[in-house]
Image: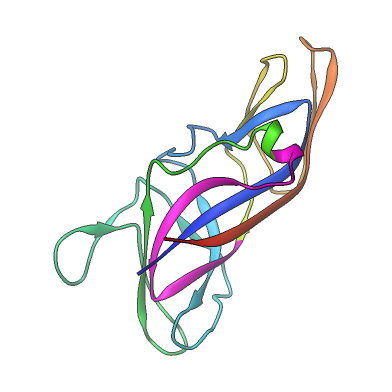
């Protein structure tokens, strides 16, 4: 069992608190990433979608997981289970310091997550308190105008990484 924390960062201009629409533990947010097989090292060709709302029973024993997938090359089964309560929004302070914010913790057995894909369903707020919802980050950036604060807002230089967590 290895835990991986999805860590994100970006350049936030006049913005703070970047996170999934319903918060870091949003049950309907789609986490998209590729999986690397722990046995043969093959990386899946397509992104895998994992949601807190979608669970499946474990094939052996009791309990559930969020994903069971078989490697197309070596046939090994692996699971990905999401662990709630470990994520935090990306704030302007974290962004300016060049650090990453933890978004979600994944318990991976037989796989390693790689290549997170930013899609839609994000929210962020301006430094003046204006909320921007259903933000689509699939193009790698976002720009708008904060009427209340009378300033442009922008998200750019999106980056994500998975860190091994004990």
Q: How many marks?
A: 0
Q: Residue at x 71, y 21 (%)?
A: 126
| Residue 14 seen in this snapshot | yes
Q: In terms of secondary structure, what is the magenta stretch mainly? A: strand
Whole-percent x and y of residue 136?
67, 40
Quarter of the picture containing the C terminus is: bottom left
Q: Is residue 75 above or below residue 107?
A: below
Q: Height in image: 118 above or below 136?
A: below
Residue 79, x across and y down, in percent: 35, 68
Color scheme of the displayed model? rainbow
Q: Is residue 110 above or below residue 4?
A: below
**Based on the displayed image, in which of its 4 quarters is residue 15 positioned?**
top right
- Indicate the position of residue 29 as horizontal and vertical percent values: 48, 43
**Residues in magenta, as a range:** 95-115
Q: Is residue 114 magenta?
A: yes
Q: Is residue 12 left or right of residue 50?
A: right
């Amino acid at each position: 069992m290895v835990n991986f924390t999805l860590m994100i960062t970006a350049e936030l201009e006049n913005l703070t608190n970047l996170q999934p629409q319903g918060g870091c533990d949003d049950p309907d947010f789609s986490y998209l990433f590729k999986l690397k097989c722990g046995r043969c090292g093959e990386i899946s060709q397509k992104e895998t979608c994992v949601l807190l709302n979608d669970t499946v029973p474990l094939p052996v024993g009791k309990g559930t997981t969020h994903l069971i997938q078989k490697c197309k090359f070596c046939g090994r089964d692996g699971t990905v289970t999401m662990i709630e309560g470990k994520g935090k929004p990306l704030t302007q302070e974290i962004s300016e310091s060049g650090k990453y914010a933890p978004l979600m913790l994944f318990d991976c057995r037989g796989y390693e997550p790689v290549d997170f894909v930013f899609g839609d369903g994000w929210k962020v707020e301006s430094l003046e308190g204006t909320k921007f919802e259903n933000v689509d980050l699939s193009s790698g950036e976002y720009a708008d105008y904060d009427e209340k604060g009378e300033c442009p807002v922008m998200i750019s230089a999106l980056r994500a990484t998975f860190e091994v967590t004990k």
